[in-house]
Image (tube, rainbow, N blue to C red):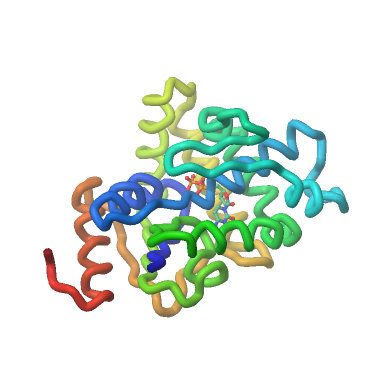
Amino acid sequence: MIIAIDGPAGAGKSTVSRMLADRLGCVRLDTGALYRVVGLAATRAGVGPDDPDLGRFVAGLAIDVEPDHIRLDGQDVDRAIRTPEASAAASRYAAVPAVRDALLDLQRRLGRARDTVIDGRDIGTVVFPDADVKIFLTAAPEQRARRRLAELVERGIDADFAAVLADIEQRDKQDSERAVAPLRRADDAVEVDTSRLDLPGSVDRCEAVVRAALGGGSS
Ligand code: CDP
């Protein structure tokens, strides 16, 4: 079973996906983390977004995905991929078709291995167009910036509201306007706006969507 959750930065995808996966007994696959690792690795290696060898570079990366950890060359990079710089790099490299191609098989392989809640930008449109359930999670940009700021502060990463909002708006633009696999709601996705919902409320709403789609009542 594949449950696809797409949406813009800060809509709550990560936390909602994790909690929903727990409730449903699925694993969660964070595809944003894959793009973040690519951005980090390529930046460190000095391989730019226009480098003709970028596709090969990405295909050759040793990325290990575990439910709550991601490793690059055996090294834990959970923290390094969450900085504002890493977010911006992820979005830049994610616009490159060779990067998306290189990550497509990996995402499909990981998603098919188990019942999975998989979140990203193009899961319902490109990676798993036949997903059993598709949710498009949104919220107003200011609300998303507020949440992202709280997350960063909690992780001890220094940031201010204006910079976080600017980053979110910049990535919304970049992610929606890119030519390949832009961020958009799949025609058959159910939109869940979390602007006025707290976290448990958002998870409840998504769980209801899943249960309705799978034909079960509430359990
Ligand atoms: O958590 P947040 O929504 O801020 O970002 P993320 O999901 O970790 O994704 C980081 C960046 O990776 C996004 O801004 C997208 O540019 C890119 N991405 C993508 O293009 N396709 C995906 N399936 C997931 C992420």
* Coordinates of residue 21 in the picture (x, y in percent): 32, 53
Left or right of residue 210, residue 45 in this image: right
Q: Residue furthest right?
A: 52
Closer to the camera, 197 or 72? 72
The quarter of the rendered structure image containing the N terminus is bottom left
Closer to the camera, 201 or 178? 201
Query: Which residue corresponds to the image point at 61% horizontal and 57% vertical from the top-left?
Result: 106
Closer to the camera, 13 or 175? 13
Residue 63 lies, with reference to residue 161, above or below; the image says below
Query: Which residue corresponds to the image point at 53% horizontal and 54% vertical from the top-left?
Result: 172
Query: Which residue corresponds to the image point at 63% horizontal and 42% vertical from the top-left?
Result: 63
Residue 129 lies, with reference to residue 142, above or below; the image says below
The quarter of the rendered structure image containing the C terminus is bottom left
Left or right of residue 74, residue 131 in this image: left
Left or right of residue 66, residue 90 in this image: right
* Coordinates of residue 212 in the picture (x, y in percent): 22, 74
Query: Which residue corresponds to the image point at 38% horizontal and 65% vertical from the top-left?
Result: 3
Residue 147 appears in which quarter of the rendering? top left
Residue 138 appears in which quarter of the rendering? bottom left
What count of labels does the image hold? 0
Left or right of residue 54, residue 29 in this image: left
Q: Residue furthest front?
A: 113
Residue 166 lies, with reference to residue 129, above or below; the image says above
* Coordinates of residue 194 in the picture (x, y in percent): 29, 54
